[in-house]
Image: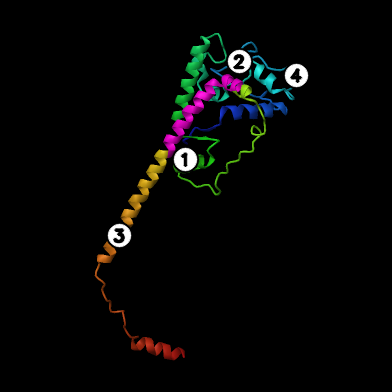
Amino acid sequence: RKFYYITLLRDPVSRYLSEWRHVQRGATWKTSLHMCDGRTPTPEELPSCYEGTDWSGCTLQEFMDCPYNLANNRQVRMLADLSLVGCYNMSFIPENKRAQILLESAKKNLKDMAFFGLTEFQRKTQYLFERTFNLKFIRPFMQYNSTRAGGVEVDNNTIRRIEELNDLDMQLYDYAKDLFQQRYQYKRQLERMEQRIRNREERLLHRSNEALPKEETEEQGRLPTEDYMSHIIEKW
């Protein structure tokens, strides 16, 4: 059995705001083990941002202020090989080096995936998926802009702060958009080339059929035989 790794990426600011709203309503990831190199992180390696059962009702400022918030650069962390940087042990290597290794690992793994899409480009994502796996969806993907994140009004300073907290995700998303467009253009060019080949083959077939002599067979214009006429008369 052959498996393919695929993923969808999202604009980091929108994704971050959406996760905040999700957490604000009481969502948690308590069942997530965060396994890395065969073990889970210690409480010292991965402290909690809140006390109690959940973080419901947290403000955006509180969400941004927690230095252990796994929402920060979540897309890079989910795609990268954490074992390269000592998993959740922040003292394993210097922070700048850790960030660079994680980003490069995430880029490599994204590039090696059979398919990835972008939430902000639903139609192109559908096209790439269909062309990659040779299938057709029953309905076209719809681009909905009215998301939870879209309903959050934030000022420019807050947006800049979110971008800073998600700097690695911002870099990954820029890389992903460029790679996505390259893959899309390649598939479109390939489709046009295949269509030109089909059109040329159809024209050649049409010309070859026109070049064949029109043979009049014995059946053309032939009167019914006597036996056949007798059979008809008997039926009447």
Residue ID for mark 2? 41
Residue 33 magenta: no
- Circle nearer the viewer, 2 or 3: 3
Identify residue type, mark 2. Answer: Pro
Is label 2 in contact with label 1 (beta carbons under 8 Å)? no
Q: What is the chief secondary structure element of the magenta stretch?
A: helix
The numbered mark, 3 or 4, whose residue comes first in the sequence reads 4
Q: Which mark is residue 128?
A: 1
- Which comes sooner in the sequence, label 1 or label 3? 1
Disc 3/disc 4 C-alpha distance (Å): 74 Å
On residue 205, the disc is 3
State the CA–CA distance, disc 1 to disc 4: 44 Å
The answer to whether mark 1 and mark 3 are in CB contact below 8 A is no
> Residue 43's x, y, as percent?
65, 13
Secondary element under disc 4, as helix, strand or loop, is: loop
Residue that carries the numbered disc 4 in the rendered image: 52
Crowding at mark 2 (Cα within 10 Å: few <14, some 14-19, many 20+): some
Q: Which residues are magenta?
A: 160-184
Q: Is residue 15 visible?
A: yes
Q: Label 1 to label 3, Cα distance in Å?
A: 31 Å
Instruction: Report, in whole angstroms, how far the alpha carbon at label 2 lies from the one at label 1.
Output: 37 Å
The amino acid marked with disc number 4 is Gly
Q: Earlier in the sequence, mark 2 or mark 1?
A: 2
* Residue 104 picture location, percent across and down: 46, 21
Mark closer to the observer (1, 4): 1
At numbered mark 1, what does the secondary structure look like: helix, strand or loop? Answer: helix
30 or 50, nearer to the observer: 50
Residue 2 vertical placement versus 142 (above, below) = above
First reached walking from the N terminus: tag 2 or tag 3: 2
